Each structure stands twice: as structure tokens, then as C-alpha cells.
């Protein structure tokens, strides 16, 4: 059996907690391609969200349904992304 400084991480990879610091781990993660960094970030954030709030999930689902219904009925109108971005650049950033 290995000493207590070895941890088993998901996927069977073994890392020595004494040999690797958090800063080293972050430095290595920052070298990953953007998609893989996003996946690492997502999984880390999900690990912090241990208590799913069903009321919040239900409220977001209702809001999404309301917005979709508004869009489908014509009560709201979408904006082209490029037009919106130009407007933000002009009005907010003065570019």
C-alpha cells in the first residue's frame, strides 16, 4: 500500500500531493487547449455546487419558457449578434 501522500484521482491517475503544488497544477492546466480548460473549469465549479437548489432550477426553467413564448409570439424581437456587438462597442466603449 502506498503512503498517505498519494491520492487517486478520477481516471486512475495518481498524483503525489507532496510533489505537486496547486500553482503547478494551475500552470499545467493553463497550457491545455481552450476547450479542455473549459472542461476543467466546469468540473471544478460543479464540484463546488454540492447542493442543487431545485427552486432555482425551476425558476430558471420557467424564465426560459417565458422568454421562448415571448419570442415565439412576437412580443419580443431578437437582435443580430454582430449588430448588437457593434452597438456595444460604439455606445459603451466608444469605438
Image (spheres, rainbow, N blue to C red):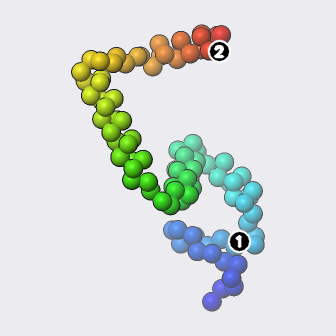
Q: At x 69% / y 58%, what residue is drawn?
A: 25
Q: Relative to the observer, which residue lies in front, 40 or 84?
A: 84
Check disc 2: other Cα within 10 Å, few if <14, some if 14-19, many if 20+.
few
Q: Which residue is tagged 2?
A: 93
Residue receiving disc 1: 17
Q: CA distance from mark 1 to mark 2?
A: 45 Å
In the figure, residue 64 lies in which quadrant? top left
Q: Quadrant of residue 47?
A: bottom right
Q: Secondary structure at mark 1?
A: loop
Q: Does any portion of residue 36 appear in the rendered image?
A: no
Give the mark toward the camera: 1 or 2.
Answer: 2
Q: Position of residue 20 (x, y in %)?
A: 73, 66
Percent position (x, y) of residue 80?
Answer: 41, 16
Placement of 80 over or under 66, stated as above or below: above
Q: Is 28 on the left-hand or right-hand side of 38?
A: right
**Res 46 visible:** yes
Image quarter where the C terminus lies is top right
Question: Who's the residue at 57% across and 42% down the image?
Answer: 34
Residue occupying the point 75% across, 72% down: 18
Q: Is residue 24 above or below residue 75?
A: below
Q: Position of residue 43 (x, y in %)?
A: 52, 55
Amino acid at each position: 500500500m502506498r503512503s498517505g501522500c498519494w491520492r487517486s484521482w478520477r481516471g486512475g491517475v495518481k498524483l503525489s500531493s507532496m510533489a505537486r503544488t496547486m500553482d503547478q497544477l494551475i500552470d499545467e492546466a493553463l497550457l491545455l487547449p481552450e476547450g479542455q480548460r473549459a472542461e476543467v473549469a466546469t468540473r471544478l465549479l460543479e464540484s463546488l455546487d454540492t447542493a442543487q437548489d431545485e427552486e432555482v432550477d425551476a425558476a430558471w426553467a420557467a424564465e426560459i419558457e417565458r422568454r421562448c413564448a415571448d419570442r415565439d409570439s412576437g412580443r419580443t424581437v431578437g437582435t443580430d449578434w454582430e449588430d448588437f456587438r457593434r452597438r456595444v462597442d460604439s455606445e459603451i466603449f466608444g469605438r
